[in-house]
Amino acid sequence: MKIKEALQNLAVFPSESRNLELPDALFSQLLHLPKFAMEMPRLQFPKALLIFSVDIDAGNKRLGLINGGKNDSNVHNYINEYKIGELEEQGFPLLLEAFNSFEVPVTFGVRGQLTGIDSPLIPLILNAPVKHDIGSHGFTHKKFEDMSQKEAEDELNMISIGMNKYGIVPKSFIFPRNSVSHLESLQKFGYECYRESGNLLNDGMYIQRKGLLCDVHPSLYITQNAQVTFLKSLLNIAIEKRTPLHLWCHTWSFGETIAQIKEKIDCVLIEFLRYAKEEEEKNLLQFDTMLSASRKARRLIERAA
């Protein structure tokens, strides 16, 4: 049984985690495994779904210059917007290539302000050999909980105008700073799904309806401290239960230098994708975006009604 194997793997993590930089990394892993192993599936699919979503907080260092440092606190707690943009500008092609090489479709939450500057990031996604889901990550990357309805809808309107330049009509929404609010406005602008705020206590393997939207719930935030064995064990649980596993990250989640980012992509992400691809070839799982997974969930929910 894959769930039993996952729980047995808990004993491995202490030795693998001695060099982790963050003290809560092992605790996170220890908590997620038994939590997911014991939970009853809310909605079972014909096979497990593996979903990746990637937040693009800036995408280009020029945004930091344009905003003059006034938007730094909305982007990161201690790294300025210029540096985040630089890391994403240089590291994102490496991340995209990893997904493309395994033919894995991903939901990319693109910050709308990026559409107003000359950046190769969006064309890179559009011209990829894999059909990715380009969703929205706000326009200015400000918290939606701090906005009035009018301010939120002004942001959503600016996103629509900017994305239209590329022929994109975003249907997936990833809230900046995971600040979930104004769901009715999302519906008004034609979005179909969003990612709810998650943490150690409320991460989950499920998709649920929220009005006309679907919450493609986060399962785990991947950081530079993620271990391949742990990610495999989570996937095994999803396969056993036929549930979604929704992993999310930023480019900068893998490190604060390009060398660190490349190392984690090569040693963790690619190794995990190779394992997931093998499970897909066994017909045990499918790769989905937030949008495609939400549409599958909606069909199942409607049939069960």
Image: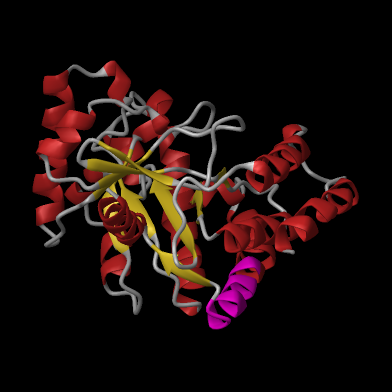
Is 281 a magenta residue? yes
Indicate the quadrant where residue 261 lies. bottom right
Is 53 a magenta residue? no
Q: Is residue 202 left or right of residue 264?
A: left
Q: Is residue 186 left or right of residue 161?
A: right
Q: Which residue is drawn at 16% across and 43% down?
A: 159
Q: Residue at x 28, y 74 (%)?
A: 127
> Residue 196, percent across and down?
40, 36
Q: Is residue 231 left or right of residue 68?
A: right
Quarter of the rendering occupied by the N terminus: bottom right
Rendered image coloring scheme: secondary structure
Instruction: Note whether 201 is above or below 296 in the view shown.
Output: above
Q: Residue at x 44, y 61 (%)?
A: 45
Q: Which of 300 and 262 is in front in this view?
A: 300
Tally of numbered tags: 0
> Residue 289, percent across and down?
37, 60
Indicate the quadrant where residue 173 lies. top left
Q: Is residue 11 left or right of residue 272?
A: right
Q: Residue lying furthest front in this view?
A: 305
Q: Residue at x 61, y 42 (%)?
A: 39
Which residue range is magenta in the image? 272-283
> Residue 224, percent across and down?
65, 49
Q: Nearer the viewer, residue 278 or 140?
A: 278
> Residue 60, percent across and down?
35, 49
Prevailing secondary structure class for the magenta stretch in the rendered image = helix
Q: Residue lying furthest bottom in this view?
A: 281
Instruction: Note whether 75 is above or below 61 in the view shown.
Output: above
